[in-house]
């Protein structure tokens, strides 16, 4: 059985155990490899061998090296906690926009580095969390001065989206399949292209760029950004579910935590920008 999740499919998870570990419901079953050898003790009920001896299958290997929900929750808590701690430091130190831009660039670089690595790296992921936290903390402090309460509104909005998408996913209202994945990725690419074009116009002297981040157009773009990020949040939940179902290694929990952190940071930033536009108008 093949996983529909693009991340795990690329790693070989859910492809019949070809990624270096067993997958599926028969994982760890010594008889799943074929017919068992004849047991010389079968006719003697008083002389059954012990596990590991001749004629008896070896004991099943421990599953402590497999991805579990507890692994994902703990790694996500560490990663998000790092983001929050770095954001709090940036807020308290009143770091300027220059530091915020540097943090954003560093976070982008580390995020792309991890995305193209074959193995999750806790060091890179936590480095991303620190840089992203500095960026979000400095931006939140800046926006909050112009629009008091914007940071808290963004936090509440992010929590609400997370809870809503989790509910819709767990109840089956949202079905994450290949069609859903293609639509989400296409929407994300389109949104990113529009944002980059708008930023390019703004950097080269066009003021607010193409107007995608101001007025009613900016509000609509912000709502679209939150909706698209919510689609990616559903993909993150699917990633976690696939990883556990197909027996992914425990280290893949860091990858799941990374995906959730990136998406939640995106949602928070969109809500922060929306709060700024609404309060400015």
Image (tube, helix red, strand yellow):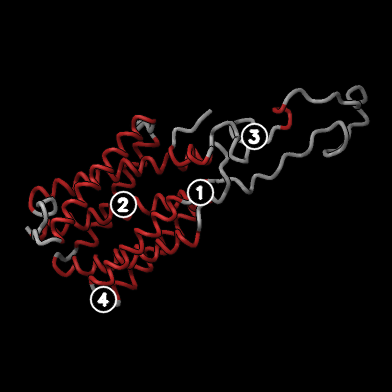
The label nearer to you, 4 versus 2, is 4
> What is the secondary structure assignment of the residue under circle 1?
loop
Instruction: Identify the residue at horizontal 46%, vertical 48% (top origin).
Output: 256
Residue on which disc 1 sits: 118
The label nearer to you, 1 versus 3, is 1
- Between the residue at mark 1 and the residue at mark 3, the CA separation in whole angstroms equals 23 Å
The 10 Å Cα crowd at callout 3, few under 14, some 14 to 19, many 20 or more, is some
The label nearer to you, 3 versus 2, is 3
Of the two numbered discs 1 and 3 on the same chain, state the one appearing first in sequence: 3
Disc 3 and disc 2 in contact, CB within 8 angstroms: no
Residue on which disc 3 sits: 27
Residue on which disc 4 sits: 94
Of the two numbered discs 4 and 2 on the same chain, state the one appearing first in sequence: 4
Disc 4 and disc 3 in contact, CB within 8 angstroms: no
Of the two numbered discs 3 and 2 on the same chain, state the one appearing first in sequence: 3
Query: Percent x, y for residue 59?
Result: 76, 39
> What is the secondary structure assignment of the residue under circle 3?
loop
Q: Quadrant of the C terminus?
A: bottom left
């Amino acid at each position: 059985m093949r996983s529909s999740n693009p991340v795990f499919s690329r790693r070989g998870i859910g492809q019949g155990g070809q990624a270096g570990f067993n997958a599926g419901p028969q994982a760890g079953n010594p008889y799943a490899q074929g017919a068992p050898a004849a047991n010389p003790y079968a006719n003697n009920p008083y002389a059954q061998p012990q596990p590991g001896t001749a004629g008896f299958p070896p004991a099943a290997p421990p599953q402590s090296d497999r991805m579990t929900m507890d692994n994902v929750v703990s790694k996500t808590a560490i990663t998000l906690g790092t983001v929050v701690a770095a954001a709090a430091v940036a807020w308290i130190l009143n770091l300027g926009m220059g530091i915020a831009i540097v943090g954003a660039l560093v976070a982008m670089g580390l995020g792309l580095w991890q995305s193209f690595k074959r193995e999750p790296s806790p060091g890179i992921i936590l480095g991303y969390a620190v840089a992203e936290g500095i960026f979000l903390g400095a931006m939140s402090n800046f926006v909050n001065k112009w629009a008091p309460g914007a940071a808290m509104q963004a936090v509440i909005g992010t929590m609400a989206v997370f809870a809503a998408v989790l509910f819709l996913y767990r109840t089956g209202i949202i079905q994450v399949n290949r069609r859903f994945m293609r639509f989400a990725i296409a929407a994300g690419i389109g949104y990113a292209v529009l944002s980059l074009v708008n930023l390019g116009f703004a950097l080269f002297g066009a003021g607010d760029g193409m107007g995608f981040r101001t007025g009613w157009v900016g509000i609509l773009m912000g709502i679209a950004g939150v909706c698209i990020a919510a689609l990616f949040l559903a993909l993150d939940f699917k990633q976690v579910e696939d990883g556990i179902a197909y027996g992914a290694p425990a280290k893949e929990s860091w990858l799941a935590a990374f995906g959730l952190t990136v998406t939640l940071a995106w949602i928070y930033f969109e809500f922060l920008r929306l709060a700024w536009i609404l309060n400015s108008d």
